[in-house]
Image (cartoon, rainbow, N blue to C red):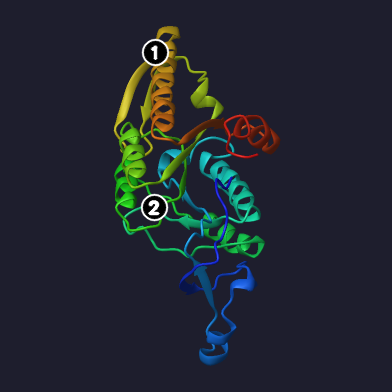
Amino acid sequence: MSRRKGVSIEFADYRDYTDGDDLRHLDWNVMARLGQAVMKTYQDEEDLTVYLLVDPSRSLDFGEPTKHRAVRRVGLGLAMAALLRGDAVRPVVIGEAHRATRTFRGRAGYTAVSQMIAKAPYQRSHDLAQSLRQFAEVDLRSGVVIVLTDAMDPQYTTALRALASRGHEVWTLCMLSPEERDPELEGDLRLVDAETGPPLEITANRATIEAYRAALDAHLNEVRKVSLAVGGRFAEVTTDMDWHTIFHRVLRKEGWVA
């Protein structure tokens, strides 16, 4: 997952020690004097920071298993891949407060990352695009931002551009249920939006289903197009895919994992 890695010999600054850091760069003199574990950093240090953002929107509380459960599972796999390659991983709870989280490194950081991802909350009404634009304004080191979402927000591409404008490389993992990809509906139906609530009366026939599929394809194709245009990546998976299919057939094909 890491695009670059390497440390020069020119000292730059100190930072707090985190689990999994290379002890060769621990400043033992400072630790002996102050009892505080700090790491030396170097001028050309280029370890990659991976931000894992789990979409808390209620639209992910759908399917069997739910999309929310499925994206957490994929997120854990991506976190492990990044940590094993030496990248720094920072799970982020997106929403009103953009709750600050620690950065984790090494195999030892996996437990903490998995606990944070598992506790990512739902929000009944959530403006994903707005929250991502707000996250883009936070003063953070640029890195890879992985958004685990269903990408159903019609303004999602504006958020992609906002994140990319701050120097981030944005990867979108779009998780859909098989029913969303290929709905089996028929007759007069009353649909209720999981987030906004207002119902919609429709007659589900072949023309309606074909129009829906065309609109979904157009939206996701635009998300993919913008993702690639701003230097990011895009992958679409469904909740019924097993681990091997997602990582070895989809994410590897899209260049997410080696």
Question: At x 45% / y 54%, what residue is drawn?
Answer: 121
Question: At x 52% / y 39%, what residue is drawn?
Answer: 67
- Which dot marks residue 251? none
- Residue at image mark 1: 211
- The residue closer to the viewer here, 119 or 4, is 4
- The answer to whether any part of residue 176 appears in the image is no
Q: Amino acid at mark 1?
A: Ala
- The residue closer to the viewer here, 31 or 67, is 31
**Please, what secondary structure does the residue beneath circle 2 have?**
loop
Q: Is residue 249 left or right of residue 55?
A: right
Question: At x 54% / y 35%, what residue is drawn?
Answer: 63
- Of badges 1 and 2, nearer the viewer stands 2
- The residue closer to the viewer here, 119 or 63, is 119
In the rendered view, would you say 204 is above or below 84?
Answer: above
Q: Amino acid at mark 2?
A: Ile
Measured from the top left, where is residue 126 in percent x and y?
A: 33, 45
Mark 1 and mark 2 in contact? Answer it, CB < 8 Å.
no
Question: At x 53% / y 32%, what residue is drawn?
Answer: 235
Measured from the top left, where is residue 220 in percent x and y?
A: 43, 25
In the rendered view, would you say 124 is above or below 29?
Answer: above
**Please, what secondary structure does the residue beneath circle 1 have?**
helix
Check the image and name the residue furthest to the bottom.
33
Mark 1 Cα shell of 10 Å, populated few (<14), some (14-19), many (≥20): few
Considering the image in quadrants, where does the N terminus appear? Answer: top right
Check the image and name the residue furthest to the front.
10
- Residue at image mark 2: 94
Measured from the top left, where is residue 258 in percent x and y?
A: 65, 39
First along the sequence among labels 1 and 2: 2
- The answer to whether any part of residue 58 appears in the image is yes
- The residue closer to the viewer here, 192 or 93, is 93
